[in-house]
Image: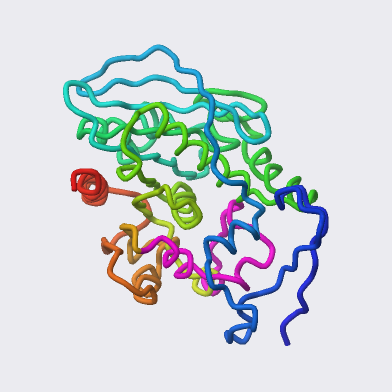
Amino acid sequence: MPMPCLPLSGAPGMAGMDTAIALCPARCHTGSYHPRMMTDLTTTLRERLGLADPVPVEFQRGNAEEADGFARERIEYRGLEGDLIPAFLFTPRGRDTLGGVVVFHQHNGEFHFGKSEVAGDVGDTFQAFGPALARRGLAVLAPDSITFEDRRGAVQGVEPDYYDWLQHYNAMSYRLLDGDVLMRKCLDDAQRALSVLLQVSGVHERRVGVAGHSYGGYTALYHAAVDPRCRFACVSGAVCSFETRRREGTGITLFETVPGLARQIDTHDVLSAIGPRPAMVVSGTQDKYSRDADQVVAKVAGDFITEFRVDRGHALDQERFDAIVEWIVDRVSI
């Protein structure tokens, strides 16, 4: 028998609401739908998380550094909790700006790498989407996620610290103690990044989207589902059903650790909420984080998803990197 619905009262992560919010599953453990079916996942998830609406964001710009085909500058703005969020902004040189994209960095157990990996300064060459996309005509904003690179409490920069993992764990656990969740914070940060990109770049609102691989892919997936300003979304290495992850013992990101989430929705529901806006799902048959991505996509109605699946593992390679760049460029060139 499914567990009864439990109330969560006075949770600061629920947009300051004092009334009890039922953690009532849309689907019972039997797989059948509960009478309280979701009619609008975007609204339901925003309310479930207590996610505030997007707002204009004040930001500060640093000095621009020119490179081959693009310029890069540091942008800083504040999060909902008053925390400083640093990001790199990449803009095209010698050509018109066609559109824009927020690129969320990966995790890879390397908390000392964030925006600098998207910049190509450190880490995996096939995470350097900032320069590649800027050279093709896009404005790219690459922010540090909370507890990564310059958003670590003890140290900043790109050198590791022994307690990096603990800061990330605490970012989730202390919020849970307060009745809050890390996903709310991360998605609020993501919304602010998109607001900053729109404000600083001046690109048309119909030509902006989000992209990310692995941890960044989860961020892009959920952000696009709850924020209709994301006019396209590329999700790499982050589409897998809860059932398959549970069966194979695949780790769940702390970002997705929301009590009762798997009783309410599954990955195909989140993907469905993006449509009819274009989405790209990149996966590998040997990647445990996207093991059944093809089956998840098959459950989604409509034809808005471009699927790119290879017989390889989780880490990106030249083929997938190039496919992602081309797909994003096509979205802003239409």
Q: Position of residue 228 (x, y in %)?
A: 44, 52
Residue nearest the viewer, comparing 145 with 36: 36
Q: Residue at x 42, y 62 (%)?
A: 239
Q: How many marks?
A: 0
Q: Which residues are magenta?
A: 246-275
Q: Which quadrant of the figure has residue 142?
A: top left
Picture layout, residue 279 above or below residue 137 = below
Question: How does the figure colour the protein chain or chains?
Answer: rainbow
Q: Position of residue 96 (x, y in %)?
A: 19, 28
Residue 251 within the segment the image draws in magenta = yes
Q: Position of residue 284 (x, y in %)?
A: 33, 62
Residue 73 within the segment the image draws in magenta = no
**Which quadrant would the N terminus be assigned to in this image?**
bottom right
Q: Residue at x 37, y 54 (%)?
A: 236
Q: Position of residue 160 (x, y in %)?
A: 55, 30
- Direction from residue 316 to residue 217 in the image, left or right: right
Picture layout, residue 138 above or below residue 61 = below
Residue nearest the viewer, comparing 89 with 167: 89
Residue 309 visible in the shown view: no
- Direction from residue 264 to residue 113 in the image, left or right: left
What secondary structure prevails in the magenta region?
helix
Which residue occupies the extreme top position in the image? Answer: 63
Picture layout, residue 145 above or below residue 289 = above
Residue 31 visible in the shown view: yes
Q: Residue at x 62, y 66 (%)?
A: 261
Q: Residue at x 31, y 57 (%)?
A: 278
Residue nearest the viewer, comparing 89 with 108: 89
